[in-house]
Amino acid sequence: MKPRIAIPVPNSKRPAYVSTSLPEYAEAVRNAGGEPVVIDVNATPAEIAQAVKACDGVLLPGSPADVDPEKYGAERHPDTAPADAFRDSTDELLLQDAYNMRKPVFGICYGLQSLNVWRTGTLDQAVPNGVNHEAGRNVTQAHRVQIDPQSKLAAILRDAGALPDNNLMIPVNSSHHQAADVVGDGLRLVAWSPEDGVKEAVEGTSPDQFVLGVQWHPERTCDGEPASRAMFRAFVKAAADWHRQLADKQQDFESVVRKS
């Protein structure tokens, strides 16, 4: 059985954006061996909770919205886009389930920002202008990121042969104007832009849960980039491992019940 990956609809107000972006996330999950489960952000909380209950991992995609600055105690910057309350609420429900059950989490672009704020972190609402962070959808290599050599992300990329000669600098695409500022509880910074210090990736500090967030868009480059494929494969593998461990625990419980 393929691991089931919950993916919230990226935005509740922009169907054209959703029609372009959502299939890329779903295809990246399929190619990594998972089964995408699209979560309707306009569904009731009970319906969302029931849907994610049957999933083995949570993928938080990008969005043209911005996280409401009130959520992290900041005043709104003039360039901050309107929030998407339905997407925000859905992310919170999915993250609550994932953290309660120790399910794998993979946040991409807005998904990283949503994860970071949910973990009580803050956002930089206006990243510096010197590096091309807002390169857009059609630029596959906008700038470089430096990766922490001791991180799980570095290990994932090394194992996939995506860091030749142990080079810890990789090119990434980029399509964002905000980024993590104060990193949230239980997260740590593992990649950054060497030119301006913008935070580009975080990962969970708990050894019993896969949590990764990247500011770029690996779902757009899975076909041609080993690093992008490696991240999705590691995430889906973590979801498969979680499902297997849950099944083992259920079997052990049933065995104890039968013997009692």
Image: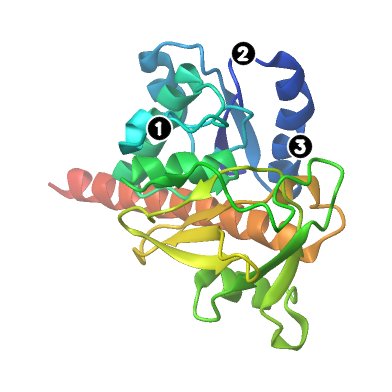
Q: Secondary structure at mark 3?
A: helix
For the residues bearing labels 1 and 2, Cβ distance under 8 angstroms: no
Q: Position of residue 223 (x, y in %)?
A: 85, 52
In the image, 41: left or right of 257? right
Could you tell me if residue 79 is visible in this image?
A: yes
Amino acid type, callout 3: Glu
Three-letter amino acid code at the position of disc 2: Lys
Q: Residue at x 78, y 41 (%)?
A: 136
Q: Estimate the x, y position of residue 150 in percent, counting from the top left.
A: 49, 80
Q: Secondary structure at mark 2?
A: loop
Q: Which residue is mark 2?
A: 13
Labels 1 & 3 near each other (Cβ < 8 A):
no
Is residue 209 placed above or below 15 in the rendered structure? Answer: below
- The label shown at residue 69 is 1
Residue for point 81% across, 51% down: 221
**Cα distance in 3D space between marks 1 and 2:** 19 Å
* Mark 2 nearby-residue class (10 Å; few <14, some 14–19, many ≥20): few
* Residue corresponding to mark 3: 24
Residue type of the residue flagged with mark 1: Pro
Which circle's residue, 1 or 3, is located before the other in the chain? 3
The image shows residue 9 at horizontal and vertical percentages of 60, 24
Q: CA distance from mark 1 to mark 3?
A: 28 Å
